[in-house]
Image (cartoon, rainbow, N blue to C red):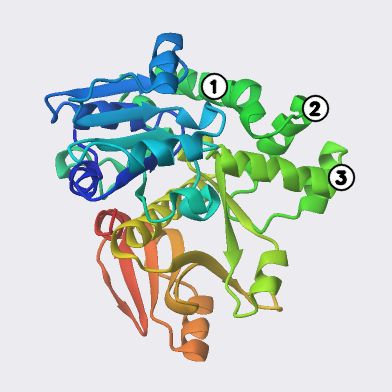
Amino acid sequence: MDRAQHDRILKDLEKKMVFLTGPRQVGKTWLAKNIAGRFPKAVYLNYDRLEDRGIIEGERWLDTTDLLVLDELHKMPDWKNRLKGIYDTRPASLRILVTGSARLETSRQLGDSLAGRFFRHRLLPLSLAELPPADRDLERLMRRGGFPEPYLAGNEVDAERWRMQYIDGLIRTDVFDIERVHDLRAMQLVLELLRLRVGSPVSYSSIARDVAVSPNTVRKFVGILEALYVVFRVTPHSRDIARSLLSQPKIYFFDTGMVAGDEGARFENLVAVSLLKHVFARADYQGERVDLCYLRTKDGEEVDFCLVRDGAAELMLETKVSGPDAGATLARFHERTGTPAAAVFQHLRREQHAGAVTLHGAENFLAGLMM
């Protein structure tokens, strides 16, 4: 199965370098090698491999190379300036694809040395929109998450074995690519508490008391988990950006299989990942400034998600396990703001309008998102 980015990357390679980022084991290397198969003289080099490292540092690939794939390049000292030099002096026939996770970050973090020289593609777990219609299985996606190996595993045991090893490897190995952490046990406890709080605003102070560390330490741990593509934050929408950043975020997992809550929490997490993938696609492929937020009043009324484009609310979205009652809160938010409102149900017999709110079944709505 080709990933959605396959043809887009091929087109962008004719214009600039391509940076392919995303969580570990989400399929970046598979996709890069699949793309390399389209070129007669492609070369794949991984900086983690000693022999490849020497070729990269000495720039010893053949002049006839038509596609150069560089994996884990961010581990090379001064890699940005080295890559700039390679790109600026390359033969016109050479395309460059750079892949990585964690420290290989987005354009605003790459500095001026690479500005204007690359297109960014973010590869996220499989979603209903990306899966072929015959392979779409909402229940499996909720149980196993969208990482290819557990989703496609032959049984639940193998999927859970993958998940245990994946998280253990991230915490014990990749975390040190981001920052030195002296108390891995505390970080694991923070992760376990976050698994139980999906869908609710998260108080760093409350978690800090439970783990017996400072709120700043919890905040640092969450930042590391974000950099490792384990979790992502959704903050409340506010035109006062500073206030929004200080407000309590909701935290979701890239791997829906990590969620330890009930069916409603798992479904909300699945919708969150799908919406984030939609937001990234609109930014990466259409150049739109879109954010994924949630809404919350001082009185505690809340709407699960809000798509915000150029600072203005575009769509309010509530998730429910079963329908057709979307609740009164979403309708009240619509009356106050005029923003289009929709509810997405895991189980819904018939899609319909309920006043100003459109009711969607999960499979139809999620399969229609841009990816």
Q: Image point 88% across, 38% down: which residue?
A: 212
Count of numbered tags: 3
Q: Secondary structure at mark 1?
A: helix
Q: Image point 34% across, 40% down: which residue?
A: 87
Mark linked to residue 183: 2
Give the CA distance from mark 1 to mark 2. Answer: 19 Å
Q: Who comes first in sequence, dot 2 or dot 3?
A: 2
Q: Tags 3 and 1 in contact by the CB under 8 Å rule?
A: no
Given residues 239 and 257, the one toward you in this image is 239
Look at mark 3 in the image and give the residue it sits on: 214
Mark linked to residue 307: none
Q: Who comes first in sequence, dot 1 or dot 2?
A: 1
Q: Tags 2 and 3 in contact by the CB under 8 Å rule?
A: no
Q: Residues within 10 Å of mark 2 (few under 14, many from 20)?
A: few
Residue found at the very far top of the displayed protein: 51
Q: Who comes first in sequence, dot 3 or dot 1?
A: 1
Q: Image point 20% across, 26% down: which residue?
A: 65
Q: Secondary structure at mark 2?
A: loop
> Considering only vertical position in the picture, is 129 above or below 165?
below
Q: Image point 46% across, 54% down: which residue?
A: 272
Mark 1 is on which residue type? Answer: Met
Give the CA distance from mark 3 to mark 1. Answer: 27 Å
On the image, the x and y values in percent for residue 42 come to: 20, 25
Query: Could you tell me which quadrant the N terminus lies in?
Result: top left
Q: Secondary structure at mark 3?
A: loop
On the image, the x and y values in percent for residue 30 come to: 29, 27
Give the CA distance from mark 2 to mark 3. Answer: 13 Å
The reply to whether residue 341 is visible in this rendering is yes
Q: Which mark's residue is nearer the viewer, 1 or 2?
A: 2
Look at mark 1 in the image and give the residue it sits on: 164
The answer to whether 164 appears left or right of 96 in the picture is: right
